[in-house]
Image: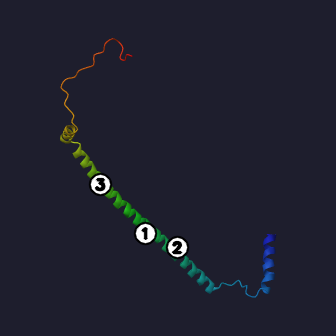
């Protein structure tokens, strides 16, 4: 309490020596501060709107790319299923000169050793 009284008495003693220091409410300063705050908030609002528009544009592009890739995946799945049909595999076997196995013959081992010197 003593500190507060000391500060108040100090201000009261200095106030008469500073000519421009008045404690009354100045309406002009209040309006300038209000318009300044409105201007700052307006600039911040413009930056926020710019950020939202940029993110919306990116999201739209990503959705379009996702839809394109999902359609391409479905088309590739259909092509893969068509390429792996039994008819295509049989024609591939004929092109590679494979022969059908008719008789199976096993190698006859002489003795109990598989490899000899």
Question: Of the numbered discs in the image, which one, if any, rests on residue 81?
Answer: none
Q: CA distance from mark 3 to mark 2?
A: 42 Å
Q: Which residue is mark 1?
A: 53
In the image, what residue occupies the spot 78% across and 79% down? 11
User: Label 2: few (<14), some or many (≥20) within 10 Å?
Assistant: few
Labels 1 and 3: the sequence-earlier one: 1
In the image, what residue occupies the spot 81% across and 78% down? 10
In the image, what residue occupies the spot 63% across and 84% down? 29
27 left or right of 56 in image: right
Labels 2 and 1: the sequence-earlier one: 2
Q: Nearer the viewer, residue 37 or 80?
A: 80
For the N terminus, which image quadrant?
bottom right
> Secondary structure under badge 3?
helix
Q: How many marks?
A: 3
Q: Nearer the viewer, mark 3 or mark 2?
A: 3
Colour pattern of the rendering = rainbow
Labels 3 and 2: the sequence-earlier one: 2
Q: Position of residue 7 (x, y in %)?
A: 79, 75
Question: Of the numbered discs in the image, which one, if any, rests on residue 44?
Answer: 2
Q: Nearer the viewer, residue 113 or 46?
A: 113
Question: Of the numbered discs in the image, which one, if any, rests on residue 72?
Answer: 3
Q: Position of residue 111 (x, y in %)?
A: 33, 11
User: Label 1: few (<14), some or many (≥20) within 10 Å?
Assistant: few
């Amino acid at each position: 309490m003593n500190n507060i009284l000391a500060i108040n008495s100090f201000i009261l003693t200095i106030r008469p020596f500073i000519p421009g220091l008045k404690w009354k409410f100045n309406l002009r300063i209040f309006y300038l501060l209000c318009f300044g705050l409105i201007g700052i908030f307006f600039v911040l609002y413009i930056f926020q709107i710019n950020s939202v528009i940029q993110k919306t544009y990116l999201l739209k592009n990503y959705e379009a790319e996702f839809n394109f890739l999902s359609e391409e995946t479905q088309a590739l799945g259909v092509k893969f299923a068509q390429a792996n049909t039994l008819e295509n595999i049989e024609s591939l076997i004929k092109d590679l000169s494979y022969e059908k196995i008719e008789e199976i013959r096993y190698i006859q081992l002489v003795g109990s050793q598989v490899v000899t010197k």
